[in-house]
Image (cartoon, grey):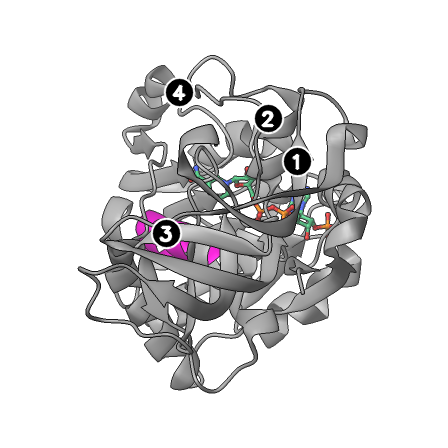
Amino acid sequence: MANSENSRKMNAIVMHEYGNSDVLKYEEVNVPEIKADEILIRVEYASVNPYDWKIREGYAKSYLQLRLPAILGIDAAGTVEEVGDKVNKFKAGDKVFCRADFTRGGSYAEYIAVGERQVAHAPRSVPLRETAGLPVVAGTAWSALFEVANLRRGQRVLITGASGGVGSVAVQLAKNAGAYVIGTTSGKNTDFVKSLGADEVVDYTTGNFSERIDPVDVVFDTVGGDTLAKSYELVKKGGVLVTSAGQPDDELAHKHGISAKGLMVSTDGKRLEEIAALVDAGKLHIHVDKEYPLSDIKAAHDFSQSGRARGKIIVRVQ
Ligand SMILES: NC(=O)c1ccc[n+]([C@@H]2O[C@H](COP(=O)([O-])OP(=O)(O)OC[C@H]3O[C@@H](n4cnc5c(N)ncnc54)[C@H](OP(=O)(O)O)[C@@H]3O)[C@@H](O)[C@H]2O)c1
């Protein structure tokens, strides 16, 4: 962070070492400086994604070079504070949302500097509190369903983990696209997943879910592990399995005559504008499960790590 600082101060959650949620420290740091094509955003809300605590624990060390100390947090919603000389799409005061680059300075901070192309105007019809839950999960669900699986009207799709951040958005996007949607979740979340538009909801806690689902054209797995392993046999020959939570097994895919794919999501401002339009059209909602103040980020991470979030965990930054 040393080369891109100015003397103004802000509060942020700083991670000096890898470890459990105790490594997240509330500290005062310098406000980042923007380059000519960047925007300084006053972050009002962030959200927690499982990736945040996976990075914190060090699971991504093998492929992610994170310079410590670091400020985590990808999702951000807030107000444009300042724009660089070459920025023309945004002006001070605009309400915006984006994916922050946490390798440079993430959204668990009162200000972030982000490239103009990563930023979008916030939906007008919902508060920034909900908007902050969108970038990672909506970008991921969109990419999985439409870019990787090429989901089409009339197809049958199974979404595992349908009550989670990614799953709850995926159910809505798949339904909007005219698919027949089946979701898995536990009994306490069945009504919630139905309310998102799922045609069938299967409670994974009352036996083997895979024995209760007829073949589908597409599986979007957001759970991984045993759930992913059991999903191959549910895909019709020629169909697609895409997972956000594990490594696809090419041998198993070949055995079942399907393709199995992982995800590399990069959600830019243009995609976020499309997502905002869906929200403003009333076709996509973010359900906020819990909200935490920035100073309580440790509890927010612990709750995410419990794997029990319904929809999104939101962080009130200021
Ligand atoms: N590759 C990428 O770019 C990318 C992007 C985003 C997310 N991801 C990954 O995708 C996964 C999902 O992310 P997320 O944000 O949706 O997580 P999340 O919000 O933490 O998911 C929690 C939800 O999962 C449900 N769940 C847990 N175990 C389940 C099971 N065995 N069967 C069905 N549902 C189950 C829970 O419902 P119950 O409480 O009812 O069990 C809960 O509602 C994570 O591993 C995340 O790291 C990857």
Which quadrant of the picture is home to ligand 1?
A: top right
On whether residue 279 falls in the magenta region, the answer is: no
> In this picture, is 268 found above or below 132?
above
Q: In this image, 108 relative to 220: left or right?
A: right
In the picture, the disc for residue 114 is 3
Residue 59: percent from left, percent from top: 58, 20
Which element is circle 1 on?
Answer: strand
State the residue position of label 1: 14
> Is 119 in front, or is 40?
40
Kindly identify the residue that appears in the image at 38 percent across and 41 percent down: 235
In the picture, the disc for residue 69 is 2
Q: Quadrant of residue 110?
A: bottom right
Q: Earlier in the sequence, mark 4 or mark 3?
A: 3
Question: Cα distance, mark 2 to mark 3?
Answer: 19 Å
**For discs 1 and 4, the disc positioned in front in the rendered view:** 1
Amino acid bearing label 2: Pro
